[in-house]
């Protein structure tokens, strides 16, 4: 657990020798820790909040983190929820309305009430953190305050924040070659750019093949309904006129009536992002059609390519190793920053590199309901 304190002036509260002993263990040191009873109280409430939406971070702020606290000083807790950008204000108002029955309960044995504050916009959290007397991470694995503060300090002295096209595993530093990274506007999981750029690259690597088939009424099939498919669909929807069907069974709420259990070819373009072999077995591709194979066939395939040969189909294999992949990364940053690409909910959870890396791999393999992808906080 990290304690980051800004020195501020006060003309009201007399400085004390220790931090609040009813709230912190080791209150007489410069590395206080929240008491277990406080952690249990907060954790119980956060679990209830998680029923509303994923909680990205929880952090304690305010005078309770200084030695100028009052005996009845509040424990103010910022709770950042992960919600779609176009619903941030609506959700903030909705969730805040629930707090009247939650806030104001004292830490057992003290006069310190606990109050929660709903935040749905990471920019608001960042701004609040800058103004706070102090920031105390509620959980060991919640490094958001430290990450934001580090990013702010680095950018103020002239450093750029960048996203790279992959990196050596467990490296604290390495040399990134020119053309393998892009600048990002701020530190935020949504700017983990490579997987987003991979989705865009499905189209952008050989975009001329899409352009020459682009016409009103042209049909396009996406096989697969995961994250890459969602990125592909949003890019196509923003730039082309294709009538798009999606063959898949996951993320039904996201896709709505675009999601099909079975499809009826032929299609002008088939974007195959699944491990199955429909594109080789079924009559999906029309004459002079395009097939984009964007996923490995993990169980192998057996085909004579007869259907594709008969229709003079074009077959392409998108890869982040293509020489112009940086262009896709730049496009990803631009579309995310402007709101043209919605990836809210894609990153389900962050993990501490020192204490939770095993959980990151375990939960990533299990893919329990509600889990999409996780990331390791490398600081």
Image (cartoon, grey):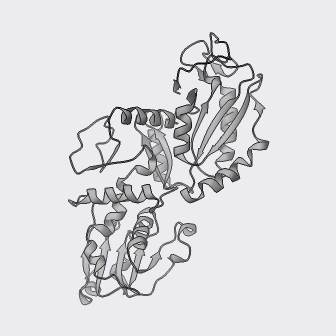
In the image, is 174 to the left or to the right of 239?
left
268 or 100: nearer the viewer: 100
Q: Nearer the viewer, residue 346 or 356?
A: 346
Q: Position of residue 353 (x, y in %)?
A: 43, 36
Residue 148 x %, y %? 46, 37
56 lies left or right of 205:
right
Q: Is residue 345 above or below residue 279?
A: above
Nearer to us in this view, 123 or 309: 123
State left or right for residue 366 relative to residue 200.
right
Judge whether residue 301 can be spotted in this image.
no
The residue positioned 54% from the left and 15% from the top of the image is 30
Rendered view: 312 above or below 54: below
Q: Please give the count of numbered marks on the rendered protein.
A: 0
When asked about the image quadrant of residue 200, the answer is bottom left
Vertical relation: 274 (above or below) 245:
above
Residue 33 pos. (x, y %): 59, 22
Residue at (38, 69) in percent of width and height: 273
Q: Residue at x 31, y 37 (%)?
A: 171
Q: Position of residue 249 (x, y in %)?
A: 51, 71
The part of the image, by quadrant, that contains residue 155 is top left
The answer to whether residue 268 is seen in the rendering is yes
Question: Quarter of the image holding residue 174?
Answer: top left
Residue lying farthest to the front in this orientation: 11
Residue at x 53%, y 54% (from the top left corner): 371
């Amino acid at each position: 657990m990290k304690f980051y304190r800004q020195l501020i002036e006060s003309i009201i509260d007399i400085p004390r020798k220790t931090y609040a002993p009813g709230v912190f263990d080791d209150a007489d040191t410069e590395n206080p820790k929240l008491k277990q009873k406080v952690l249990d109280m907060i954790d119980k409430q956060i679990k209830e909040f998680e029923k509303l939406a994923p909680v990205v971070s929880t952090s304690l702020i305010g005078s309770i983190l200084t030695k100028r606290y009052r005996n009845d000083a509040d424990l103010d807790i910022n709770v950042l929820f992960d919600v779609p950008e176009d619903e941030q204000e609506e959700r903030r108002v909705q969730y805040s309305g629930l707090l009247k029955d939650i806030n104001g309960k004292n830490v057992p044995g003290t006069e310190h009430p606990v109050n929660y504050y709903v935040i749905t916009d990471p920019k608001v959290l960042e701004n609040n953190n800058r103004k706070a007397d102090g920031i105390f991470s509620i959980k060991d694995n919640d490094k958001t305050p430290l990450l934001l503060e580090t990013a702010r300090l680095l950018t103020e002295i002239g450093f750029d924040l960048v996203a790279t096209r992959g990196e050596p595993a467990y490296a604290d530093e390495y040399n990134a070659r020119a053309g393998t990274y892009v600048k990002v506007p701020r530190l935020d999981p949504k700017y983990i750019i490579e997987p987003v750029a991979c989705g865009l690259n499905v189209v952008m690597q050989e975009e001329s093949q899409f352009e020459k088939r682009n016409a009103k009424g042209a049909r396009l099939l996406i096989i697969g309904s995961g994250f890459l498919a969602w990125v592909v669909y949003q890019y196509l929807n923003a730039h082309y006129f294709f009538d798009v069907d999606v063959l898949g069974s996951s993320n039904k709420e996201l896709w709505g009536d675009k999601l099909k259990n079975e499809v009826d070819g032929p299609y002008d373009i088939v974007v195959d992002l699944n491990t199955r072999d429909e594109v080789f077995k079924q009559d999906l591709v029309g004459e002079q059609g395009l097939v984009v194979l964007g996923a490995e066939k993990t169980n192998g395939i057996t085909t004579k390519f007869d259907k594709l040969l008969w229709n003079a189909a074009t077959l392409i294999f998108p890869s982040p190793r293509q020489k112009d992949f940086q262009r896709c990364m730049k496009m990803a940053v631009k579309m995310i920053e402007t709101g043209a690409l919605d990836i809210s909910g894609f990153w389900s959870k962050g993990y501490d590199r020192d204490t939770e890396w095993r959980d990151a791999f375990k939960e990533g393999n299990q893919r329990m309901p509600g889990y999409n992808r996780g990331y390791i906080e490398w600081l």
